[in-house]
Amino acid sequence: MKKLLLLCILLFALILPAAAQITGVSPPAVDLLADFTTIAGVAAFTLLIAGWLKTAFKLEGALARWVSWAVGIVISFVGWYFNIGLFDPLLWWQTLFYGFGIGLVANGIYSAETIQLILSFFGAQVKRE
């Protein structure tokens, strides 16, 4: 047992100086606006905000789904107003469709690929992920 402990200490003593020499590694930068470049990213952001609202106000059932749809539409219009990500080239009515679709994705009713297909039928230029 003593030999095993001594071996572990020696290995740690040999590895520690090599690990201490590693420099220049910086943590990745957090870019919240990068979430607005795809439907899946905006849906994830919608889930975050809607989940916070659902727990803060203890919402359940149909009211919780309506909150997710409303949050998806509001986030879409905020992105459209500030010309962020995929909302930059859209008209207001296309943004409404995107917001409703993002709400459906956030509720788990449809996947992001299905919403992209539906939006392409309405003439929206959908960026493939």
Image (tube, rainbow, N blue to C red):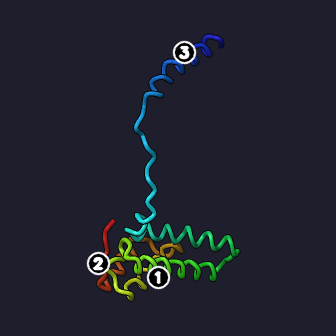
Mark 3 or mark 1, which is nearer to you? 3
Q: Residue at x 40, y 38 (%)?
A: 24
Residue that carries the numbered disc 3 in the rendered image? 10
Q: N-terminal of the two: label 2 or label 3?
A: 3
Q: Position of residue 34 (x, y in %)?
A: 40, 63
Circle 1 crowding by C-alpha within 10 Å: few under 14, some 14–19, many from 20: many
Q: Is residue 19 above or below residue 80?
A: above
Amino acid under disc 3: Leu
Q: Is residue 20 left or right of residue 114?
A: right
* Image mark for residue 125: 2
Residue that carries the numbered disc 1 in the rendered image? 100
Amino acid under disc 2: Gln
Q: Residue at x 64, y 73 (%)?
A: 54
Q: CA distance from mark 3 to mark 1?
A: 61 Å
Q: Quadrant of the N terminus?
A: top right
Mark 2: which secondary structure?
loop
Q: Say if mark 2 contacts mark 3, CB within 8 Å.
A: no
Q: CA distance from mark 1 to mark 2?
A: 16 Å
Q: CA distance from mark 2 to mark 3?
A: 61 Å
**Where, by quadrant of the figure, is residue 23 drawn?**
top left
Mark 1: which secondary structure?
helix
